Amino acid sequence: MTRTVAREISVTLGFSLADKPENVEEVLESFFDREYYTTLSAENELFAEYPGKKQLEYIKKIVEGTVNHRDELDSYIEKYSKGWKLTRISRVALSILRTALFEVLYMDDVPDSVAINEAVELSKGYEEQETVSFINGILGSFMRAERGTDVLSEREPEASAGSTPDRED
């Protein structure tokens, strides 16, 4: 499983926890029950492969982190969404934004440009182009104002032949 897929699973879980963040451990435990997870693969290709140990840790870190830092992440989203209230932003877009901001702020092993690019690319599969541009604008404004940098487009490196850093065989 690539980190991109693990990130998308994290966004999916973040979406499902939007209204009940206090149940994060319970949701994670039941979601990653192997029997339950197997049933998901019949419904959605995203869940075709059960996460390895590293991917599971990564997913849990993002999901727990976005829940634990929700107020901080949401304050950045509100600040850079230029007057939009969180209630006007779709739950999917919020989950994508929270995930990207959490990775930028708290995950040193993820380059900022990768977190931003992956969020924009992921949003293309779930949102209209207008919302994709909105997400890109918020994240770009955050990077310029908070990090003093523009974001360069950069894809997360996939495992090279003979090397599988994101795979647990």
Image (cartoon, grey):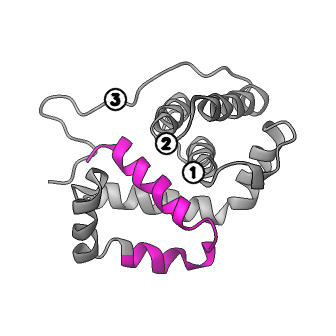
Q: Position of residue 80 (x, y in %)?
A: 79, 37
Whether 163 is among the magenta residues is no
Residue at the image position 41 percent from the left and 26 percent from the top: 155
To which quarter of the image does residue 23 belong? bottom right
Looking at the image, is mark 2 or mark 1 earlier in the sequence? 1
Marks 3 and 1 close (CB-CB < 8 Å) = no
Q: Is residue 58 above or below residue 165?
A: below
Residue carrying label 2: 126
Looking at the image, is mark 2 or mark 3 earlier in the sequence? 2
How far apart, in angstroms, are the residues tagged by discs 3 and 1? Answer: 25 Å
Magenta residues, as a range? 1-30
Q: Position of residue 68 (x, y in %)?
A: 64, 66
Marks 2 and 3 close (CB-CB < 8 Å) = no
Whether 28 is among the magenta residues is yes
Secondary element under disc 2, as helix, strand or loop, is loop
Residue carrying label 3: 157
Marks 2 and 1 close (CB-CB < 8 Å) = yes
Residue carrying label 1: 92
* Quadrant assignment for the C terminus: bottom left
